Image (spheres, helix red, strand yellow):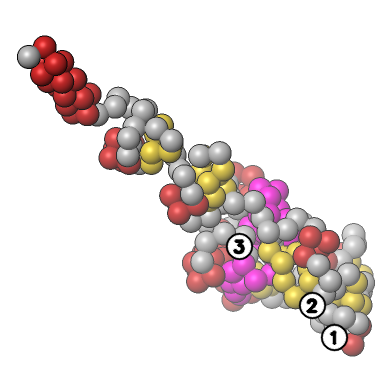
């Protein structure tokens, strides 16, 4: 009888223990952790156990979701015949000068001749971009055509940009010729979204200049999306350089 009572007591204790789930952050399975969006790892609720538990663009490191590091930061990380573009390894743009349309092949990238340009910002002080070449600027057109910068995912002009455009509007009205406003975005987000964002940025600059009296027919807008970066660095500084509107004359 005594033995039967002992076994009954042990069975009751097991039933009580197994009937009480552990208290967070301790766990037996994922059910204890799911309310917090976590998973059970070795008896403890954690943010992740594997990459699949993290959202896109993140990886599981020491049971924490962290941004995936870029595939590369320098060309040497990509191996022979490849270069690092926006944090990803890609095929080199060229092997020799013949692939560069009159430019030079340097470290797998085509470099345009020094006197060629697509905008006045490509040229030196006192020079202008005309017909794809840097030439001496006309005194009446020596305006501050430095690119207008934008915040992440923004197409509105901050106070600094508005102040610059106020000075630029007066300079443009005193000169002649048409200007193309080229909008650009960094490479975060889809290509289609970035194209639309770059168009909105160019349109915002045109609208501000025309409100200040610049004739609308002298300004043309075009959006290039993420396809013409000035920086390939996958950093906040590099992305900020690419969020811009350039003035092409």
Element at label 2: loop
Query: Residue 171: image x %, image y %?
Result: 73, 60
From what the image shows, is residue 132 above or below residue 1?
below
Tell me if I can see residue 16 in this picture: no
Question: For mark 3, does the 10 Å Cα neighbourhood hold few (<14), some (14 to 19), or many (20 or more) residues?
Answer: some
Residue range corresponding to the magenta coloring:
219-247
Marking on residue 99: 1
Marks 2 and 1, Cα distance to the nearest angstrom?
A: 8 Å
For marks 3 and 1, the one nearer the N-term is 1
Q: CA distance from mark 3 to mark 1?
A: 25 Å
Decide: is 7 above or below 33.
above
Instruction: Please tell me whether mark 2 or mark 3 is closer to you in this view.
Output: 2
Disc 2 to disc 1: CB gap under 8 Å = yes
On whether residue 146 falls in the magenta region, the answer is no
What is the secondary structure assignment of the residue under circle 1?
A: helix
Marks 2/3 in contact by CB < 8 Å: the verdict is no
Image point 72% across, 67% down: which residue? Answer: 89
Marks 2 and 3, how far apart in space? 19 Å
Residue with the mark numbered 3: 187
- Which quadrant of the figure has residue 218? bottom right
């Amino acid at each position: 009888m005594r033995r039967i009572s002992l076994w009954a007591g042990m069975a009751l204790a097991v039933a009580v223990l197994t009937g009480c789930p552990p208290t967070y952050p301790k766990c037996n399975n994922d059910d204890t952790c799911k309310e917090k969006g976590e998973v059970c790892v070795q008896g403890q609720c954690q943010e992740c156990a594997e990459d699949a538990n993290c959202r896109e663009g993140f990886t599981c490191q020491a049971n924490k979701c962290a941004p995936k590091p870029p595939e590369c930061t320098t060309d040497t990380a990509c191996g022979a015949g490849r270069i690092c573009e926006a944090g990803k390894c890609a095929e080199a743009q060229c092997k020799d000068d013949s692939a560069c349309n009159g430019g030079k092949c340097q470290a797998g990238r085509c470099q345009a001749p020094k006197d060629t340009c697509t905008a006045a910002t490509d040229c030196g002080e006192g020079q202008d971009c005309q017909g794809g070449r840097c030439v001496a600027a006309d005194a009446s057109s020596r305006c501050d055509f430095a690119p207008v910068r934008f915040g992440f995912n923004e197409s509105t002009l901050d106070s600094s940009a508005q102040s610059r455009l106020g000075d630029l509007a007066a300079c443009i009205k005193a000169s002649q010729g048409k200007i193309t406003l080229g909008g650009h975005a960094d490479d975060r987000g889809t290509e289609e979204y970035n194209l639309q964002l770059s168009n909105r940025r160019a349109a915002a600059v045109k609208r501000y200049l025309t409100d200040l009296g610049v004739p609308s027919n002298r300004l043309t807008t075009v959006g290039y999306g993420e396809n013409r970066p000035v920086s390939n660095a996958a950093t906040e500084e590099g992305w900020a350089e690419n969020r811009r509107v350039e003035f092409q004359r």
